[in-house]
Every structure is written in C-alpha cells, then in structure tokens.
Amino acid sequence: MNITKTDEVISKKNANKRFSFRPEERIKQSRDFLVAKKLARKFHTHDFIVLVMERKSKDRNLTLKSRLGITVTTKAVPLSPHRNRLKRILREAFRLHKHRLIKNFDIVVIVKETARRCTYFEVEQQLLNMLSQSGFLKLT
C-alpha cells in the first residue's frame, strides 16, 4: 500500500486536532467554576484538589468536549512566574491526555501550596494516577 503526501498531511492534521487545546476546552467563567465546586466529585492528590464533573448536553446531537479549569491562588503560590508555570504544565498534561478520558468532563484543578516546585512529570503522574484510579481515564 502506497502512502501519498496527502495522506501524511491528513494524518498530521488529525493528530494536531487531537492534541490541541482549543478555547472551547477551557473553563473561563466563574459560574462554571462555582457549579463544579458544588456538584463535582472531589479528589485529593499530594499537590492538587481535582474536581471532576460529567458534562451533559440537552441536545443529543451535540457532542461536548472535556474542559479544564485551573485555580492557582496567590496564597498558595506567591510568585507569578511560578503560578504561570504550573498553569502551563497542567494545560500541557491535559492537552496530551484528554483523548484518553472516558466521557466528556469538566475538570477543575485547584493547586495547593505544596505544588510550588513540582516538575512536569510529577504533575502528569499525579493527575493520571488520580484519573485512572477514579475510573475517568482509559487504560492504554
């Protein structure tokens, strides 16, 4: 079977879509954070509190995407470069593993004070362990 250049381009485009982090995959509005805080299941890791809530659509034909919201307070992480670094790391971990989620969820991550010096691999490991142990992540 011959693979043409157009097949390669199409497969790269699909891969890029799968691993992108689009604006509709972000929780931005405070009411969405508040709803998650009230209704979501709460899980604790060493450095994070993770709220997970299934997204449901009123329209059966509409497919919803999983969304991520991140809360890093100044009290927990006082220096803004460290806060921004943690947010980048959390977004990257979500972006690379969102296709493994079983359903469409709203995930809110609240960063604890102990997360100040976390590396990417520690953050990724904590999130993946929590999501897989709680049954939200497909095992590959």
Image (spheres, rainbow, N blue to C red):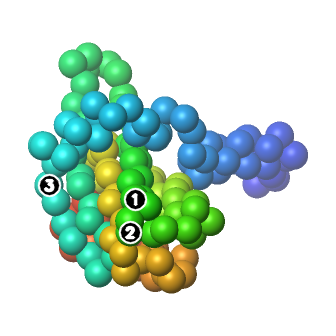
Residue matched to label 3: 41
Regarding residue 132, the answer to whether it shows in the image is no
User: Where residue 83 sits in the image (x, y, percent)?
Assistant: 52, 64
Secondary structure of residue under mark 1 = loop
Relative vertical location of residue 94 with respect to residue 22 in this rendering, above or below: below
The reply to whether dot 3 and dot 1 touch (C-beta < 8 Å) is: no
User: Where residue 84 sits in the image (x, y, percent)?
Assistant: 58, 60
The amino acid type found where label 1 is placed reads Thr
The amino acid type found where label 3 is placed reads Arg
Residue matched to label 2: 76
What is the distance, in whole Å, between disc 2 and disc 1 at their CAs?
A: 5 Å
The reply to whether dot 2 and dot 1 touch (C-beta < 8 Å) is: yes
Q: Nearer the viewer, residue 89 or 58?
A: 89
Left or right position of 3 against 19: right
Left or right position of 4 against 132: right
Q: Residue 126 sits in which quadrant? A: bottom left
Q: Residue 22 sits in which quadrant? A: top right
Residue matched to label 1: 73
Give the position of the N terminus as an image quadrant: bottom right
Closer to the observer: label 2 or label 3? 2
Secondary structure of residue under mark 2 = loop
Regarding residue 5, the answer to whether it shows in the image is yes
Left or right position of 59 against 38: right
Residue at 27% across, 61% down: 50
User: Where residue 90 sits in the image (x, y, percent)?
Assistant: 49, 62
Q: Residue 29 sits in which quadrant? A: top left
The amino acid type found where label 2 is placed reads Ala
Relative vertical location of residue 51 with respect to residue 10 in this rendering, above or below: below
Residue at 32% across, 52% down: 108
Q: Name which of mark 3 and mark 1 comes first in the sequence.
A: 3
What is the distance, in whole Å, between disc 2 and disc 3 at their CAs?
A: 22 Å
